[in-house]
Image (cartoon, rainbow, N blue to C red):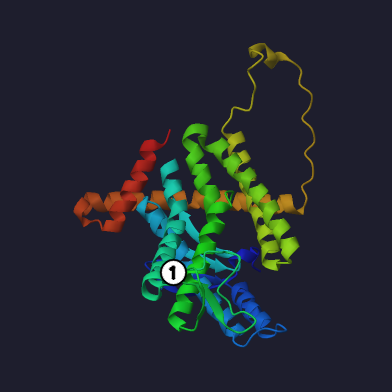
Protein backbone atom coordinates (compact mmCIF):
# COMPACT_ATOMS: atom_id res chain seq x y z
CA UNK A 1 0.00 0.00 0.00
CA UNK A 2 1.36 3.42 -0.93
CA UNK A 3 1.60 5.57 2.19
CA UNK A 4 2.57 8.85 0.58
CA UNK A 5 -0.32 10.08 -1.57
CA UNK A 6 1.90 12.69 -3.23
CA UNK A 7 3.86 9.85 -4.89
CA UNK A 8 0.83 8.57 -6.80
CA UNK A 9 1.87 9.62 -10.29
CA UNK A 10 2.64 8.26 -13.73
CA UNK A 11 5.40 9.05 -16.22
CA UNK A 12 4.75 10.84 -19.51
CA UNK A 13 8.33 10.79 -20.76
CA UNK A 14 11.78 12.22 -20.27
CA UNK A 15 13.41 15.39 -21.63
CA UNK A 16 17.01 16.59 -21.14
CA UNK A 17 17.55 13.70 -18.75
CA UNK A 18 14.66 14.87 -16.56
CA UNK A 19 11.73 12.52 -15.95
CA UNK A 20 8.30 14.16 -16.22
CA UNK A 21 5.62 12.68 -13.98
CA UNK A 22 1.96 13.65 -13.62
CA UNK A 23 -0.03 13.21 -10.43
CA UNK A 24 -3.11 11.11 -11.07
CA UNK A 25 -5.40 13.86 -9.69
CA UNK A 26 -4.24 16.48 -12.22
CA UNK A 27 -6.12 15.06 -15.26
CA UNK A 28 -9.25 14.75 -13.11
CA UNK A 29 -9.04 18.40 -12.07
CA UNK A 30 -8.38 19.57 -15.62
CA UNK A 31 -11.33 17.60 -17.01
CA UNK A 32 -13.51 18.87 -14.16
CA UNK A 33 -12.66 22.52 -14.89
CA UNK A 34 -13.36 22.02 -18.59
CA UNK A 35 -16.64 20.30 -17.73
CA UNK A 36 -17.64 23.14 -15.42
CA UNK A 37 -17.42 25.54 -18.36
CA UNK A 38 -19.23 23.11 -20.65
CA UNK A 39 -22.24 22.88 -18.31
CA UNK A 40 -22.15 26.41 -16.88
CA UNK A 41 -25.51 28.07 -17.26
CA UNK A 42 -25.38 31.04 -19.63
CA UNK A 43 -21.88 30.23 -20.86
CA UNK A 44 -21.25 31.58 -24.39
CA UNK A 45 -20.58 29.08 -27.21
CA UNK A 46 -17.01 27.81 -27.26
CA UNK A 47 -16.38 28.27 -23.54
CA UNK A 48 -15.32 24.71 -22.91
CA UNK A 49 -12.92 24.85 -25.89
CA UNK A 50 -11.42 27.99 -24.35
CA UNK A 51 -11.06 26.20 -21.01
CA UNK A 52 -9.36 23.25 -22.72
CA UNK A 53 -6.92 25.61 -24.44
CA UNK A 54 -6.16 27.35 -21.15
CA UNK A 55 -5.55 24.03 -19.41
CA UNK A 56 -3.11 22.98 -22.12
CA UNK A 57 -1.26 26.29 -22.06
CA UNK A 58 -1.20 26.22 -18.27
CA UNK A 59 0.31 22.74 -18.23
CA UNK A 60 2.96 23.75 -20.79
CA UNK A 61 3.81 27.00 -18.97
CA UNK A 62 4.18 25.35 -15.56
CA UNK A 63 6.29 22.57 -17.07
CA UNK A 64 8.66 25.06 -18.71
CA UNK A 65 8.77 27.00 -15.42
CA UNK A 66 9.93 23.87 -13.59
CA UNK A 67 12.54 23.16 -16.27
CA UNK A 68 13.91 26.61 -15.45
CA UNK A 69 14.48 25.48 -11.85
CA UNK A 70 16.12 22.26 -13.04
CA UNK A 71 18.52 23.97 -15.45
CA UNK A 72 19.41 26.52 -12.77
CA UNK A 73 20.17 23.69 -10.33
CA UNK A 74 22.46 22.03 -12.84
CA UNK A 75 24.12 25.37 -13.55
CA UNK A 76 24.95 25.64 -9.83
CA UNK A 77 26.46 22.12 -9.79
CA UNK A 78 23.36 20.55 -8.28
CA UNK A 79 21.20 17.71 -9.58
CA UNK A 80 17.71 17.76 -11.07
CA UNK A 81 16.26 14.61 -12.56
CA UNK A 82 12.47 14.73 -12.03
CA UNK A 83 9.49 17.07 -12.35
CA UNK A 84 6.11 16.31 -10.80
CA UNK A 85 3.06 18.04 -12.27
CA UNK A 86 0.14 18.14 -9.89
CA UNK A 87 -3.08 20.18 -9.41
CA UNK A 88 -1.36 23.00 -7.50
CA UNK A 89 1.45 23.53 -10.00
CA UNK A 90 4.77 21.76 -10.43
CA UNK A 91 7.55 20.44 -8.23
CA UNK A 92 11.13 20.28 -9.52
CA UNK A 93 13.24 17.72 -7.66
CA UNK A 94 16.50 19.68 -7.20
CA UNK A 95 19.03 17.96 -4.95
CA UNK A 96 22.63 18.17 -3.76
CA UNK A 97 22.84 21.95 -4.15
CA UNK A 98 25.85 23.75 -2.67
CA UNK A 99 24.88 25.09 0.75
CA UNK A 100 25.36 28.71 -0.27
CA UNK A 101 22.94 31.65 -0.57
CA UNK A 102 23.85 32.29 -4.21
CA UNK A 103 23.11 28.71 -5.26
CA UNK A 104 19.70 28.67 -3.61
CA UNK A 105 18.83 32.13 -4.97
CA UNK A 106 19.73 31.18 -8.54
CA UNK A 107 17.72 27.96 -8.39
CA UNK A 108 14.68 29.76 -6.94
CA UNK A 109 14.93 32.50 -9.59
CA UNK A 110 15.36 30.04 -12.48
CA UNK A 111 11.65 29.33 -12.83
CA UNK A 112 10.42 32.96 -12.71
CA UNK A 113 13.10 34.00 -15.22
CA UNK A 114 11.82 31.46 -17.74
CA UNK A 115 8.24 32.56 -17.08
CA UNK A 116 9.27 36.19 -17.59
CA UNK A 117 10.90 35.24 -20.90
CA UNK A 118 7.64 33.64 -22.08
CA UNK A 119 5.79 36.84 -21.14
CA UNK A 120 8.25 39.00 -23.07
CA UNK A 121 8.17 36.80 -26.16
CA UNK A 122 4.40 36.31 -26.35
CA UNK A 123 3.63 39.92 -25.42
CA UNK A 124 6.24 41.25 -27.84
CA UNK A 125 4.88 39.22 -30.74
CA UNK A 126 1.36 40.46 -29.94
CA UNK A 127 2.44 44.08 -29.95
CA UNK A 128 4.73 44.08 -32.99
CA UNK A 129 2.81 41.60 -35.16
CA UNK A 130 -0.77 42.61 -34.31
CA UNK A 131 -0.31 46.07 -32.74
CA UNK A 132 -2.32 44.89 -29.72
CA UNK A 133 -1.45 45.10 -26.02
CA UNK A 134 -1.14 41.93 -23.93
CA UNK A 135 -3.76 41.44 -21.17
CA UNK A 136 -2.00 42.98 -18.15
CA UNK A 137 -4.92 42.69 -15.71
CA UNK A 138 -4.42 39.34 -13.91
CA UNK A 139 -8.06 39.35 -12.77
CA UNK A 140 -9.53 39.43 -16.30
CA UNK A 141 -8.39 36.53 -18.47
CA UNK A 142 -8.75 36.80 -22.28
CA UNK A 143 -12.00 34.82 -22.19
CA UNK A 144 -15.15 35.12 -24.24
CA UNK A 145 -17.64 37.67 -22.94
CA UNK A 146 -21.43 37.35 -22.90
CA UNK A 147 -21.48 38.06 -26.63
CA UNK A 148 -19.08 35.22 -27.33
CA UNK A 149 -16.11 37.39 -28.39
CA UNK A 150 -12.67 38.08 -26.94
CA UNK A 151 -11.77 41.73 -26.38
CA UNK A 152 -8.33 43.30 -25.98
CA UNK A 153 -6.76 46.75 -26.17
CA UNK A 154 -4.82 47.84 -29.22
CA UNK A 155 -1.80 50.14 -29.30
CA UNK A 156 -4.10 53.16 -28.98
CA UNK A 157 -5.84 51.71 -25.89
CA UNK A 158 -9.04 51.19 -27.87
CA UNK A 159 -11.10 48.06 -27.15
CA UNK A 160 -11.08 45.66 -30.11
CA UNK A 161 -12.51 42.24 -30.90
CA UNK A 162 -10.01 39.43 -31.43
CA UNK A 163 -10.92 36.71 -33.90
CA UNK A 164 -7.42 35.54 -34.88
CA UNK A 165 -6.49 32.13 -33.44
CA UNK A 166 -2.76 32.88 -33.30
CA UNK A 167 -3.31 36.13 -31.43
CA UNK A 168 -5.77 34.42 -29.09
CA UNK A 169 -3.17 31.79 -28.21
CA UNK A 170 -0.51 34.45 -27.67
CA UNK A 171 -2.81 36.51 -25.45
CA UNK A 172 -3.69 33.53 -23.29
CA UNK A 173 -0.08 32.35 -23.14
CA UNK A 174 0.97 35.80 -21.95
CA UNK A 175 -1.83 36.02 -19.39
CA UNK A 176 -1.10 32.60 -17.89
CA UNK A 177 2.62 33.30 -17.53
CA UNK A 178 1.93 36.82 -16.23
CA UNK A 179 -0.30 35.40 -13.48
CA UNK A 180 2.24 32.66 -12.77
CA UNK A 181 5.03 35.23 -12.47
CA UNK A 182 3.04 37.48 -10.13
CA UNK A 183 1.86 34.49 -8.11
CA UNK A 184 5.40 33.27 -7.42
CA UNK A 185 6.98 36.67 -6.77
CA UNK A 186 4.27 38.62 -4.95
CA UNK A 187 3.56 35.75 -2.53
CA UNK A 188 6.92 36.13 -0.75
CA UNK A 189 6.74 33.22 1.64
CA UNK A 190 7.66 29.58 1.83
CA UNK A 191 7.27 27.42 -0.30
CA UNK A 192 6.82 29.83 -3.23
CA UNK A 193 9.73 31.04 -5.34
CA UNK A 194 9.46 34.52 -3.85
CA UNK A 195 9.82 33.09 -0.35
CA UNK A 196 12.85 31.04 -1.34
CA UNK A 197 14.46 34.07 -2.98
CA UNK A 198 13.71 36.13 0.15
CA UNK A 199 15.36 33.50 2.33
CA UNK A 200 18.45 33.35 0.11
CA UNK A 201 18.70 37.16 0.07
CA UNK A 202 18.55 37.36 3.90
CA UNK A 203 20.88 34.40 4.42
CA UNK A 204 24.27 36.23 4.17
CA UNK A 205 23.27 38.85 6.77
CA UNK A 206 21.07 36.84 9.15
CA UNK A 207 22.32 33.29 8.72
CA UNK A 208 20.50 30.24 7.37
CA UNK A 209 18.45 29.53 10.49
CA UNK A 210 16.96 33.01 10.97
CA UNK A 211 16.40 33.60 7.25
CA UNK A 212 14.52 30.30 6.98
CA UNK A 213 12.34 31.19 9.98
CA UNK A 214 11.40 34.52 8.39
CA UNK A 215 10.56 32.78 5.10
CA UNK A 216 8.41 30.21 6.91
CA UNK A 217 6.57 32.83 8.99
CA UNK A 218 5.95 34.79 5.78
CA UNK A 219 4.55 31.57 4.33
CA UNK A 220 2.03 31.36 7.16
CA UNK A 221 0.95 34.94 6.41
CA UNK A 222 0.56 34.05 2.73
CA UNK A 223 -1.48 31.03 3.80
CA UNK A 224 -3.95 33.30 5.59
CA UNK A 225 -4.28 35.55 2.52
CA UNK A 226 -4.89 32.59 0.20
CA UNK A 227 -7.36 31.09 2.66
CA UNK A 228 -9.38 34.30 2.84
CA UNK A 229 -9.42 34.54 -0.95
CA UNK A 230 -10.57 30.91 -1.19
CA UNK A 231 -13.48 31.60 1.19
CA UNK A 232 -14.53 34.88 -0.43
CA UNK A 233 -14.34 33.56 -4.00
CA UNK A 234 -15.43 29.96 -3.18
CA UNK A 235 -12.36 28.56 -4.94
CA UNK A 236 -11.69 24.92 -3.97
CA UNK A 237 -8.21 24.84 -5.54
CA UNK A 238 -7.18 27.84 -3.44
CA UNK A 239 -8.51 26.03 -0.36
CA UNK A 240 -6.31 23.02 -1.15
CA UNK A 241 -3.38 25.37 -1.75
CA UNK A 242 -3.97 26.86 1.71
CA UNK A 243 -3.72 23.40 3.25
CA UNK A 244 -0.60 22.62 1.22
CA UNK A 245 1.14 25.83 2.35
CA UNK A 246 0.29 25.08 5.98
CA UNK A 247 1.64 21.51 5.79
CA UNK A 248 4.76 22.59 3.88
CA UNK A 249 5.58 25.42 6.31
CA UNK A 250 4.91 23.22 9.36
CA UNK A 251 7.10 20.44 8.03
CA UNK A 252 9.92 22.84 7.13
CA UNK A 253 9.73 24.44 10.57
CA UNK A 254 9.98 21.05 12.26
CA UNK A 255 13.00 20.06 10.17
CA UNK A 256 14.64 23.44 10.81
CA UNK A 257 14.13 23.34 14.57
CA UNK A 258 15.27 19.71 14.81
CA UNK A 259 18.47 20.44 12.91
CA UNK A 260 19.07 23.57 14.99
CA UNK A 261 18.65 21.76 18.30
CA UNK A 262 20.99 18.97 17.22
CA UNK A 263 23.64 21.54 16.32
CA UNK A 264 23.77 22.91 19.90
CA UNK A 265 25.48 21.39 22.96
CA UNK A 266 22.20 21.08 24.76
CA UNK A 267 23.43 22.85 27.94
CA UNK A 268 23.30 26.50 28.98
CA UNK A 269 26.63 27.67 30.48
CA UNK A 270 25.37 31.20 31.09
CA UNK A 271 25.34 30.56 34.88
CA UNK A 272 28.83 29.09 35.01
CA UNK A 273 30.09 25.56 35.42
CA UNK A 274 28.88 25.34 39.04
CA UNK A 275 25.34 25.00 37.80
CA UNK A 276 26.25 21.47 36.77
CA UNK A 277 26.16 20.54 40.45
CA UNK A 278 22.57 21.67 40.96
CA UNK A 279 19.82 19.15 41.40
CA UNK A 280 17.72 19.22 38.30
CA UNK A 281 14.07 18.22 38.30
CA UNK A 282 13.17 15.19 36.22
CA UNK A 283 12.44 16.03 32.61
CA UNK A 284 8.75 16.53 31.82
CA UNK A 285 6.94 13.62 30.33
CA UNK A 286 6.71 13.89 26.59
CA UNK A 287 3.28 14.76 25.29
CA UNK A 288 1.57 12.30 23.01
CA UNK A 289 1.67 13.53 19.42
CA UNK A 290 -1.50 13.96 17.43
CA UNK A 291 -2.05 12.64 13.91
CA UNK A 292 -0.66 15.73 12.14
CA UNK A 293 2.43 15.89 14.37
CA UNK A 294 3.14 12.20 13.80
CA UNK A 295 2.69 12.65 10.04
CA UNK A 296 5.02 15.66 9.99
CA UNK A 297 7.59 13.79 12.07
CA UNK A 298 7.47 10.82 9.70
CA UNK A 299 7.90 13.14 6.72
CA UNK A 300 10.89 14.84 8.36
CA UNK A 301 12.49 11.50 9.24
CA UNK A 302 11.87 10.21 5.72
CA UNK A 303 13.50 13.30 4.23
CA UNK A 304 16.55 12.96 6.49
CA UNK A 305 16.84 9.28 5.62
CA UNK A 306 16.64 10.07 1.90
CA UNK A 307 19.35 12.71 2.24
CA UNK A 308 21.59 10.23 4.10
CA UNK A 309 21.02 7.61 1.40
CA UNK A 310 21.94 10.17 -1.27
CA UNK A 311 25.15 11.03 0.57
CA UNK A 312 26.03 7.34 0.89
CA UNK A 313 25.38 6.82 -2.82
CA UNK A 314 27.57 9.81 -3.66
CA UNK A 315 30.37 8.43 -1.49
CA UNK A 316 30.19 5.05 -3.24
CA UNK A 317 30.24 6.66 -6.67
CA UNK A 318 33.12 8.88 -5.57
CA UNK A 319 35.15 5.78 -4.71
CA UNK A 320 34.32 4.27 -8.10
CA UNK A 321 35.44 7.39 -9.96
CA UNK A 322 38.67 7.63 -7.98
CA UNK A 323 39.39 4.01 -8.84
CA UNK A 324 38.66 4.75 -12.51
CA UNK A 325 41.07 7.71 -12.44
CA UNK A 326 43.74 5.53 -10.87
CA UNK A 327 43.39 2.94 -13.63
CA UNK A 328 42.71 5.02 -16.74
CA UNK A 329 43.55 8.63 -15.83
CA UNK A 330 41.33 11.69 -15.29
CA UNK A 331 40.72 12.12 -19.03
CA UNK A 332 38.69 8.90 -19.02
CA UNK A 333 35.89 10.64 -17.09
CA UNK A 334 32.84 11.93 -18.94
CA UNK A 335 31.71 15.55 -18.59
CA UNK A 336 28.95 14.52 -16.19
CA UNK A 337 31.42 12.49 -14.08
CA UNK A 338 33.82 15.43 -13.92
CA UNK A 339 31.03 17.75 -12.76
CA UNK A 340 30.02 15.20 -10.13
CA UNK A 341 33.62 14.81 -8.94
CA UNK A 342 34.06 18.59 -8.65
CA UNK A 343 30.78 19.07 -6.80
CA UNK A 344 31.48 16.34 -4.23
CA UNK A 345 35.10 17.47 -3.82
CA UNK A 346 33.93 21.04 -3.14
CA UNK A 347 31.48 19.70 -0.58
CA UNK A 348 34.27 17.94 1.30
CA UNK A 349 36.48 21.06 1.15
CA UNK A 350 33.70 23.23 2.63
CA UNK A 351 32.78 20.67 5.27
CA UNK A 352 33.68 21.99 8.75
The answer to which of 38 and 212 lies nearer the viewer is 38
Q: Quadrant of residue 49?
A: bottom right
Horizontal relation, residue 318 to residue 273: left or right: left
Mark 1 closeness class: few <14, some 14–19, many ≥20 residues within 10 Å: few
Residue 104 spot, x, y in % from top left:
45, 47
User: Outermost residue, bottom direction?
Assistant: 45
Q: Quadrant of residue 351?
A: top left
Q: Is the residue 243 above or below the residue 279 in the image?
A: below
Q: Secondary structure at mark 1?
A: loop
- Whether residue 135 is visible: yes
Task: Please identify the quadrant where the C terminus is shown.
Answer: top left
The answer to which of 80 and 136 lies nearer the viewer is 136
Q: Is the residue 292 above or below the residue 214 in the image?
A: below
Horizontal relation, residue 155 to residue 191: left or right: left
The answer to which of 275 and 312 lies nearer the viewer is 275
**Residue depicted at x 30% and y 55%:** 337
Task: Please identify the quadrant where the N terminus is shown.
Answer: bottom right
Q: How many marks?
A: 1
**Residue depicted at x 49% and y 32%:** 205
Residue 219 spot, x, y in % from top left:
63, 48
- Whether residue 81 is visible: no
Residue 131 spot, x, y in % from top left:
40, 72
Residue 11 spot, x, y in % from top left:
50, 74
Return the residue at label 1: 155
Amino acid sequence: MVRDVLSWSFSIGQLFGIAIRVHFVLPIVMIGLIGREAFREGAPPGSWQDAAMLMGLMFLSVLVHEFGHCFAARFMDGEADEILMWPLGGLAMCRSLPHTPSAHFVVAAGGPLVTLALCVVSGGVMYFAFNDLPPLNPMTPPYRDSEGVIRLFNGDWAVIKVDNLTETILARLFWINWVLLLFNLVLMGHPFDGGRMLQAALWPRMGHYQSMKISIYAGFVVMVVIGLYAIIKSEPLMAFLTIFVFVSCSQEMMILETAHEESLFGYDFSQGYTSLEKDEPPPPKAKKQNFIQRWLAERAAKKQQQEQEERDAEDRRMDELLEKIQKFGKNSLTDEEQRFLKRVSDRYKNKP
